[in-house]
Image (tube, rainbow, N blue to C red):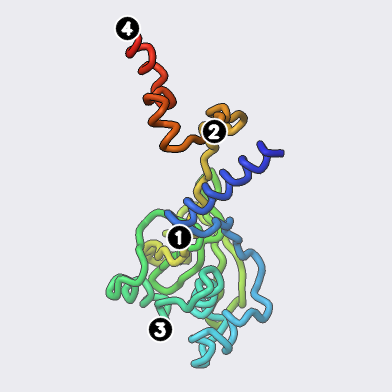
Amino acid sequence: MRKLIKNSIITVLLTIIVITVFPTTVFANEYEPRLTAPSGEPYYTRELNAYAQTGYGMPNCVAYAYGRVYEMNGEKPLITRGNAGDWWFINKANDYYEYGSEPKLGAVACWSRHVAVVEEIADDGAITVSESHWGGRYFNTNVYYNMSSHYGQTFYGYIYTYNEPEEEPEIPEPSYKMEEQYFAPQEKNCFTALAFTQSNNTIMNPKNNSLLNM
C-alpha cells in the first residue's frame, strides 16, 4: 500500500512539473478531413462567413475556403476579402500565414482563379482537396498529382492556414523506485545538559572515554 501511495505521489509531482514547464502545451488532435459537403455549420453561412454576409456565399471557392479555415482553427480567418486570384497576394502582402510550395494538411491551395483546401496527402503523392465553385458545384473533392493541371490555371502555391495543435510531451518514467527505505529508523536518545557534562562528552563521542584512559 505504501509503495502504491509513493508511486502515485511521484506521478502527480511529475505531472505538475510538466504543466509548469509547458503551460501552453495542448493535447494534439488528429487532422479531420472534410470529404462531405457542409450541412448548415455556421462557418459556411451568414452567421460567421464574411463572404456569405456580403452576398457571395457558397457555391463560391473563397467562401468555402474561408469557412473551412474557420472550422479547422475555431477562429476567424485573417484573410477576409478578395477573390480567388487575390488570396495568395493578400496573404503575402500582409504576412498573415506562412506559405510555400509543399502541400500540408489544412493548407489553402491557390491558383490564378481558384482556391481549395488540402484534406489528404497519400504516400504516392496524391493530394485530395475539398472545394466549391462560383456559379457551379456547391461542394466536391478532387485528387491531384500535379496541381498545375487544375483547369489549366497558374498554380501559386499553398497558404498554411491550419494551426496544428502542439504534441503532448511524454512524462518520463522515474529513474528510481521507492520500494525500500533508504535509511533504517534510528533510535532517538534524549539527555539533559547536566547528563552530557557529567558523561565527559561520551554520550556524543564515546571514544573520548578511551582517550582519557590512555
Image quadrant occupied by the C terminus: top left
Q: Which residue: 66% across, 68% down?
A: 36
Mark 2 or 4, nearer chain start: 2
Q: Point out which mark residue 188 bears.
A: 2
Quadrant in the picture for residue 123: top right
**Secondary element type, mark 3:** loop
Q: Amino acid at mark 4?
A: Met
Residue occupied by mark 3: 81
Q: What x and y, as percent, mark residue 177?
A: 57, 32
The amino acid type, in three-letter code, at marker 3 is Arg
Contact between labelled residues 2 and 3, with CB atoms less than 8 Å apart: no
Q: CA distance from mark 3 to mark 4?
A: 101 Å
Crowding at dot 4, Cα within 10 Å, few <14 / some 14-19 / many 20+, comes out as few
Disc 1 target residue: 23
Residue at x-position 54% and y-position 68%: 72
User: Is 76 in front, or is 136?
Assistant: 76
Residue under circle 4? 214
Q: Is residue 4 above or below residue 81?
A: above
**Tag 4's secondary structure?**
loop
Q: Earlier in the sequence, mark 4 or mark 1?
A: 1
Spatial CA distance of label 1 from label 2 is: 45 Å
Q: Does label 1 or label 2 sit earlier along the sequence?
A: 1
Q: Nearer the viewer, mark 3 or mark 2?
A: 2
